[in-house]
Image: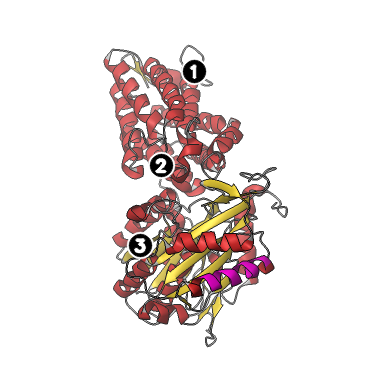
């Protein structure tokens, strides 16, 4: 278990602060992660890796000459926010453009994608190469759906070495894409990992069993098998990877045996010796292998095997020197330290001349977000348990972080006397920034979109509420790209929207329409138990998910229910003036 911490909620930030203090010769702390503290030649491509924390030495430990220029570090097992990715990339940029590379997870894709758009808008050319090495997460003909695990290292190393050699962004991207295509990984677990502050692991593997095909975020494996001997495990891993090799594979491979946190090095050495013999017997030459902890999962008892099939160019860059806190190869001349600009002063909030009625509505919006926060906080453990069935168990934690941050930002904005739009904009940004992950991106964008649609008014009508619900829904579906039946939040959100709009069309007041929509959302959330997940981390574990509702759909229904109850005008609101201010021509919003 993870035992050393003060407040579990601050674990990853305090760990990152300590890591930077212990490795000042390599890295400097920036808002959202770390960048190299040593000189980076002007015009060099900045390779920026990233993902959730809990995987050391990935990702911060791979920052240094010959490898990454910066690393974006999210919460434990949770993608960083778009703002974090943007700020780290800005600090890492040396004028040659930015290459983002990270594992193929929905939250990372959304957040890094938004950061890429922001960087491009400022004239910083930015590309992305997703790592898709895990053969257990999708078949070979759907390689674009595979997730990234320990194969992160091969892609980051090839890209970093190419950038260090002075290649331009096009060439660095091309080599990273090729490295990813020629990399395959498969993992096993003997027991789960425990999040800081949690009393139990995210999952258990039964005694005498082994889980095959696990992820690196606490996701359980896709199947269980009797515990093998070392020779049997070596045969299983090697045979599965060789059966999945790229079409143009040669006979030279990098083999990486990666410990996930609890397997001892001596055990890894026993297994690697058997793996090396099997690869040699198969006619392969093992080139500069690695055996140790390289991409971990907190204290997970497990390991993974990665094979990178080399060509001449890839072999050259794999063998190139690198010098980072967590990965070293060859030797490099010492680098002078560089001076990094400190964090920018916070920009003073813009003043907004709003009427008393508009400010009162802003306070009501903040009160509504406080209700959303309370709904999540009260059910955080339930949501986590539900997510752990086929995911990584962090949905409750991530939702709590986001909802608490959003409610706090909304409260502070409302105290300044601003409108609904400003309150919801601040809340959406805070939700995305603090929660990270897919849910953070979706909820943050959706709340902000609803705010933009509502704008600044002294009162709202039913059509305003309809437009806000539509904008919220469009933001989720456009950004997340989920469809009905994918077993996501969308499966509750779309019935909510349809029922809400239908009730308004039938002449119901907003609160009545909201009550009808909540009923539809709750029924739809319950019905997701019969669906197989087609999106997100639960997709590779579809069978385990059957019979259990989707946590994203459930959390949406919980929040909608709490807000509906709060806005039921048959009960007095804390400030009766707010109730009066939102009644427009009989339509309450």
Residue at the spot 36% in from the left edge and 71% down from the top edge: 249
Give how far apart the Cα atoms at labels 1 and 3 are. 51 Å
Residue marked by disc 3 = 128
Which numbered disc, 1 or 3, marks the residue closer to the eye? 3
Residue 268 sits inside the magenta stretch: yes
Report whether 300 appears left or right of 440.
right
Q: Nearer the viewer, mark 2 or mark 3?
A: 3
Residue nearest the observer in this picture, 110 or 316: 316
In primary-sequence order, the first of circles 2 and 3 is: 3
At numbered mark 1, what does the secondary structure look like: helix, strand or loop?
helix
Residue placed under numbered mark 1 in the picture: 576
Q: Residue at x 60, y 55 (%)?
A: 12
Give coordinates of residue 451: x percent, y percent.
37, 36
Q: Which residues are magenta?
A: 267-278
Which residue matches tag 2? 442
Between 269 and 443, the one lying in front of the other is 269
Visual colour scheme: secondary structure
- N-terminal of the pair, mark 1 or mark 3, is 3
Q: Are marks 2 and 1 in contact (CB under 8 Å)?
A: no
User: Between marks 2 and 1, how big is the CA–CA gap?
Assistant: 32 Å
Q: CA distance from mark 2 to mark 3?
A: 20 Å
Q: For residue 299, which quarter of the picture?
A: bottom right
User: Residue 526 at x, y = what percent?
Assistant: 46, 25
Mark 2 or 1, nearer chain start = 2
């Amino acid at each position: 278990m993870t035992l050393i911490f003060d407040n579990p909620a601050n674990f990853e930030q305090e760990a990152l602060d300590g890591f930077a203090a212990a490795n000042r010769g390599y890295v400097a702390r920036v808002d959202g992660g770390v960048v190299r503290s040593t000189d980076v030649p002007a015009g060099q491509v900045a390779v920026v890796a990233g993902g959730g924390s809990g995987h050391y030495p990935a990702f911060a430990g791979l920052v240094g000459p010959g490898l990454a220029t910066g690393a974006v570090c999210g919460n434990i097992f949770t993608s960083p926010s778009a703002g974090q990715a943007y700020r780290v990339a800005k600090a890492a940029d040396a004028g040659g453009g930015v290459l983002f590379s990270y594992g193929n997870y929905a939250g990372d894709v959304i957040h890094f994608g938004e950061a890429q758009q922001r960087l491009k808008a400022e004239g910083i050319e930015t590309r992305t190469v997703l790592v898709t090495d895990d053969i257990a997460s999708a078949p070979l003909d759907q390689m674009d759906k595979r997730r990234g695990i320990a194969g992160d290292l091969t892609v980051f190393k090839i890209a970093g070495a190419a950038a260090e050699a002075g290649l331009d962004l096009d060439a660095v991207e091309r080599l990273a894409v090729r490295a990813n295509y020629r990399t395959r990984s498969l993992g096993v677990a003997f027991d789960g990992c425990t999040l800081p502050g949690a009393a139990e692991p995210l999952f258990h593997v039964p005694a005498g069993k082994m889980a095959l095909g696990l992820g690196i975020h606490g996701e359980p494996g896709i199947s269980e098998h009797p515990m093998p001997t070392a020779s049997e495990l070596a045969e299983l891993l090697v045979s599965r990877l060789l059966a999945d090799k790229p079409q143009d594979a040669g006979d030279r491979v990098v083999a990486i045996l990666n410990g996930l946190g609890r397997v001892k090095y001596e055990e890894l050495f026993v297994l690697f010796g058997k793996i090396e013999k099997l690869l040699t017997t198969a006619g392969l030459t093992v080139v500069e292998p690695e055996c140790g902890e390289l991409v971990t999962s907190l204290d997970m008892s497990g390991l993974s095997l990665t094979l990178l099939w080399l060509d001449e160019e890839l072999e050259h860059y794999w063998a190139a020197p690198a010098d980072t806190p967590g990965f070293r190869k060859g030797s490099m001349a010492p680098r002078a330290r560089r001076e990094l600009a400190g964090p920018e002063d916070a920009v003073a909030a813009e003043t907004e001349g709003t009427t008393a009625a508009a400010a009162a509505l802003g306070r009501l919006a903040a009160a509504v977000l406080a209700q959303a926060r309370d709904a999540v906080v009260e059910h955080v453990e339930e949501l986590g348990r539900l997510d752990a069935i086929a995911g990584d168990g962090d949905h409750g934690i991530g939702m709590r972080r986001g909802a608490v941050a959003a409610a706090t930002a909304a409260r502070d904005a409302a105290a300044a006397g601003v409108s609904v739009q400003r309150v919801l904009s601040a809340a959406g940004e805070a939700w995305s920034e603090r929660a990270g992950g897919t849910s953070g991106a979706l909820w943050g964008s959706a709340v902000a979109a609803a705010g933009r649609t509502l704008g600044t008014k002294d009162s709202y009508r039913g059509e305003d509420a309809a437009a806000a619900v539509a904008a919220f829904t469009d933001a989720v579906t456009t950004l997340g790209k989920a469809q009905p039946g994918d077993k996501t939040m969308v499966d509750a959100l779309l019935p909510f929207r349809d029922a809400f709009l239908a009730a308004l069309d039938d002449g119901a007041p907003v609160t009545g329409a909201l009550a009808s929509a909540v009923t539809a959302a709750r029924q739809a959330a319950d019905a997701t138990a019969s669906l197989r997940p087609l999106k997100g981390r639960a997709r590779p574990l579809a069978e385990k998910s059957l019979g259990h509702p989707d946590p994203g759909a459930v959390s949406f229904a919980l929040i909608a229910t709490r807000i509906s109850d709060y806005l039921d005008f048959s009960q007095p609101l804390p400030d009766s003036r707010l109730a009066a201010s939102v009644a427009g021509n009989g339509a309450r919003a």
